[in-house]
C-alpha cells in the first residue's frame, strides 16, 4: 500500500486561522489546546485541502474569516516518493481547485487524489441520526469505485427538485412531469446501485472493525435498504401514481433520497436503542471500514483526522483505536485538550509522533514559543 502524507500546509483566512504555515510529520501529529482555540479549524483546513469541502458545513462562506472576502488552503502532498501541490480557494459563490497549478476535470477527480477520513464529535450522527449522513458515507466510498457517481447524485437531486416544483406550481397533470420523472429514474437507479455496491464493500469491514473495538459478544450488522423499485418501468409507475401524495407532502415518497444503511447490534436497531458508548464504537467502526475500503480502491492509505478524541473516546477505546490502526502506516492528525492521554507504544503502527499547540489560531510545534505540553 502506497504511503500518503501532507508535508506542508499553508492556510489563509480559514475561520480563526488568519495566516498559518506548518510542516507536518508523516506519522502521528498531536494538536493540543484549550477549547475554542482553533484545533478543529486546523483539521477542517486539511479536509478542505484534500476534498474541497468542509466536514462541518455545506456553506463554504461560513468558513471564511470575518472581514475577508476569500480563504485558501495550499499544501504539498507526498505519495510514494512523488510530491504534488494542491490548493483550494473559496469565497462568495466561487471555489477554485488546482493540482500542480492545473484545474482538474471535475471536483470529484480532485477529491479522490488525497483520500481523507475524519472522526469528529458530529460524526456520531452516522448512527444516531437519520439516513442522510449514512448516505453521504456511501457516496464517499462509491466515489473511489465510480467517480461519475457524484454526478448521478447531483443530477438526481436536480431532477427531483424540478419534479417537485412542477407538481407544486402546475399540478400532477403537467405535461413535462414525465420527462422529469424519466431523469429521476435514470439517475436514481444509478445512485442506488452505486450506494448498494459501496454498502457491500463497507459492511464486512465495519463488522470486523466493531469486533475489535466494540463490547465483547456484541455483533454489528448493516443492511442497505432500498426505497424505490429496481426496474425502470416499476419505478416510473410508482412516481406517476404518487404525484398527488408527493405534492401534498412536499417530496417524493420513493427514491434513493430515502434509502438507508440500517445498523443493528445483536439484532436490535442501533438508532434510538444503543448506548452512547455503543454509538461511538459503531461510528468508529464505520470510519475504520471507510479507511480499509478506500485503501483497497485507491491503493493508498487515507489521511486520518481525529477531532477531540480524548473526550469522544475513553482510554480503553482510544487504545483499541490505535490497536486497530496497527501496521496501517497512516498519517494521523489528532486534536485533544489532554495530550498526556494519547499513549502510543512502539507497536502501534503510527510512528514519528510530532506535537503542536494551538492558542488563538496560532499553531506552533511544541517548544517553539507557545509552551510545551
Image: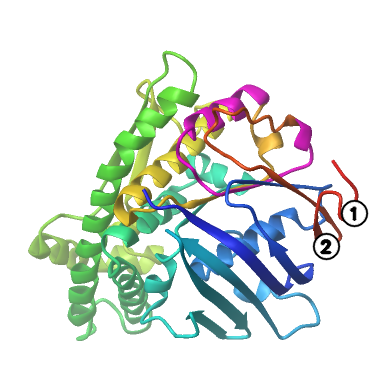
Coordinates of residue 16 in the picture (x, y in percent): 79, 67
Determine whether the residue tagged by mark 2 lies in a helix, strand or loop. strand
In front of the other: 92 or 185: 92
Q: Earlier in the sequence, mark 2 or mark 1?
A: 2
- Dot 1 surroundings within 10 Å: few (below 14), some, or many (20 or more)? some
| Residue 320 located within the stretch drawn in magenta | yes
In front of the other: 171 or 363: 363
Q: Which residues are magenta?
A: 315-340
Q: Which residue is mark 2?
A: 362
211 sits to left or right of 66: left
Q: CA distance from mark 2 to mark 1?
A: 9 Å
Res 54 visible: no
Q: Which color scheme is applied?
A: rainbow
| Residue 179 located within the stretch drawn in magenta | no
Q: Where is 221 relative to 366, above or below?
A: above
Q: Are marks 2 and 1 in contact (CB under 8 Å)?
A: yes
Q: Which residue is mark 1?
A: 370
- Dot 2 surroundings within 10 Å: few (below 14), some, or many (20 or more)? some
Residue visible at 24% across and 79% down in the picture:
180
326 sits to left or right of 121: left
Coordinates of residue 3 in the picture (x, y in percent): 45, 52
Res 95 visible: yes
Q: Quadrant of residue 340?
A: top right
Number of dots carrying numbers: 2
Coordinates of residue 119 in the picture (x, y in percent): 56, 46
Residue occupying the far top of the picture: 217
Q: Where is 308 relative to 80, above or below?
A: above
Instruction: Say which quadrant the C terminus sits in.
Output: top right
In front of the other: 262 or 78: 78
212 sits to left or right of 29: left
Q: Quadrant of residue 311?
A: top right
In front of the other: 221 or 168: 221
Amino acid at each position: 500500500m502506497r504511503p500518503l502524507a501532507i508535508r506542508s500546509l499553508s492556510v489563509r483566512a480559514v475561520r480563526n486561522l488568519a495566516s498559518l504555515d506548518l510542516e507536518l510529520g508523516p506519522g502521528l501529529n498531536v494538536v493540543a489546546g484549550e477549547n475554542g482555540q482553533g484545533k478543529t479549524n486546523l483539521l477542517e483546513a486539511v479536509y478542505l485541502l484534500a476534498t474541497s469541502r468542509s466536514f462541518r458545513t455545506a456553506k463554504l462562506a461560513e468558513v471564511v474569516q470575518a472581514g475577508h472576502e476569500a480563504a485558501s488552503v495550499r499544501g504539498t502532498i507526498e505519495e510514494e516518493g512523488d510530491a504534488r501541490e494542491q490548493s483550494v480557494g473559496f469565497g462568495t459563490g466561487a471555489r477554485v481547485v488546482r493540482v500542480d497549478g492545473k484545474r482538474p476535470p471535475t471536483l470529484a477527480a480532485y477529491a479522490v487524489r488525497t483520500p481523507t477520513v475524519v472522526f469528529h464529535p458530529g460524526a456520531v450522527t452516522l448512527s444516531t441520526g437519520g439516513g442522510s449522513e449514512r448516505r453521504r458515507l456511501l457516496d464517499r466510498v462509491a466515489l473511489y469505485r465510480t467517480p461519475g457517481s457524484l454526478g448521478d447524485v447531483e443530477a438526481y437531486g436536480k431532477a427531483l427538485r424540478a419534479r417537485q416544483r412542477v407538481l407544486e406550481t402546475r399540478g400532477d397533470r403537467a405535461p413535462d412531469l414525465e420527462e422529469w420523472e424519466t431523469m429521476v429514474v435514470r439517475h436514481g437507479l444509478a445512485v442506488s446501485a452505486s450506494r448498494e455496491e459501496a454498502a457491500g464493500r463497507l459492511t464486512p469491514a465495519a463488522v470486523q472493525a466493531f469486533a475489535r473495538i466494540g463490547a465483547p459478544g456484541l455483533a454489528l450488522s448493516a443492511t442497505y435498504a432500498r426505497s424505490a423499485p429496481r426496474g425502470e418501468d416499476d419505478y416510473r409507475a410508482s412516481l406517476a401514481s404518487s404525484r398527488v401524495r408527493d405534492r401534498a407532502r412536499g417530496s417524493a415518497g420513493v427514491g434513493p433520497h430515502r434509502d438507508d444503511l440500517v445498523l443493528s447490534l445483536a439484532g436490535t436497531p442501533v438508532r434510538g436503542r444503543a448506548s452512547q458508548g455503543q454509538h461511538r464504537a459503531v461510528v468508529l467502526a464505520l470510519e475504520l471500514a471507510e479507511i480499509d475500503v478506500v485503501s483497497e480502491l485507491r491503493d493508498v492509505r487515507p489521511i486520518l483526522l481525529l477531532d477531540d478524541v480524548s473526550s469522544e473516546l475513553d482510554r480503553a477505546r482510544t487504545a483499541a483505536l490505535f490497536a486497530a490502526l496497527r501496521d496501517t502506516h497512516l498519517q494521523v492528525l489528532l486534536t485533544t485538550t489532554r495530550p498526556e492521554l494519547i499513549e502510543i507504544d512502539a507497536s502501534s503502527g503510527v510512528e514519528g509522533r510530532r506535537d503542536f499547540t494551538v492558542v488563538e489560531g496560532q499553531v506552533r510545534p511544541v517548544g517553539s514559543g507557545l509552551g510545551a505540553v
